[in-house]
Image (spheres, rainbow, N blue to C red):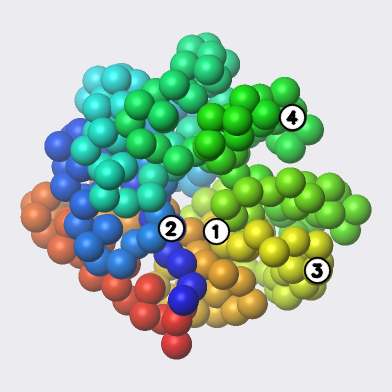
Amino acid sequence: MKQLVAYITTGFPSVEFTIDAALALAEAGVDTLELGMPFSDPVADGPVIEAANLKALQNGFRLEHLFDASTKIAPHIDTLWMGYFNPFYHKGVDHFIAKAKETGVNGFIIPDLPFEEAKPYKPAIEEAGLNLIDFIAPTDPKARIEQIVADAKKFIYLVAYAGITGAGKSEDLQEVVAQIKGATDTPVFVGFGVDQNTAQEKAKGVDGVIVGSAFVKVLLDTTLSDTQKIAKITAIAKEIKEKINN
């Protein structure tokens, strides 16, 4: 069965909401949860997730909120922290490794930490039994793809197009998927621009999809109550999970 990874921004609209939404998504069939670490300059993300990041920070988000929420979420769903490298550098990667082990989180997604620059940190992360997810772009040449996937763990994050999340672009990924699959047995998940309308097409040839903006758009909708937001994102999750497996 193909997997569904869901991203939500921690602390938006509140930490309590994040916990409730995460547990509801787990019940709706989401396989892995990306808990987003709000950051002031989320360079890989489009305006939707950027807005949620800003609002979470304005609401007083602190890293302790991420850690506290994770203790309540990680026992119920495979959980990864998705964040930019600045907090990891500032606090120290070892600090995040210790907190991940303490809370039951299984690893990190750091989109602005290239493969080459991740090399000094990866051994300690993997020795702790955690995962640092590797990215591949459709513009990567075959030689670089083979280099990246040689030691990739858990899953490979295939960026669906050159750009930012939620942009809704479309590229033919079959050639790059074939190159990845020819070099590794590690599952390949596609992200960027995946929603209930595009998931079935983007899931072709890969092992799962990563969905963020489609969920966060709902969280930004001020006409909905928290209960309505959770009902809507769980319905989207169920629809996507069904479509990628049909």
The reply to whether dot 1 and dot 2 touch (C-beta < 8 Å) is: yes
Mark 4 vs mark 1, CA separation in Å: 23 Å
Mark 4 vs mark 2, CA separation in Å: 25 Å
Q: Residue 137 in the image: x percent, y percent?
A: 72, 54
**Which residue is pictured at 45% across the width and 87% down the height?**
246
Say which of marks 1 and 2 sits in front: 2
Left or right, 244 with respect to 238, comes to right
Badge 2 is on which residue? 5
Badge 3 is on which residue? 182
Say which of marks 4 and 1 sits in front: 4
Which quadrant of the view contains residue 132? Answer: top right
- Residue type (three-letter) at the residue carrying disc 3: Gly
Ranked by sequence position, the earlier of labels 3 and 2 is 2
Name of the residue lying farthest toward the bottom: 246
Q: Residue 225 in the image: x percent, y percent?
A: 9, 52
Q: Tell which of 26 and 56 is nearer to you.
A: 26
The reply to whether dot 1 and dot 3 touch (C-beta < 8 Å) is: no
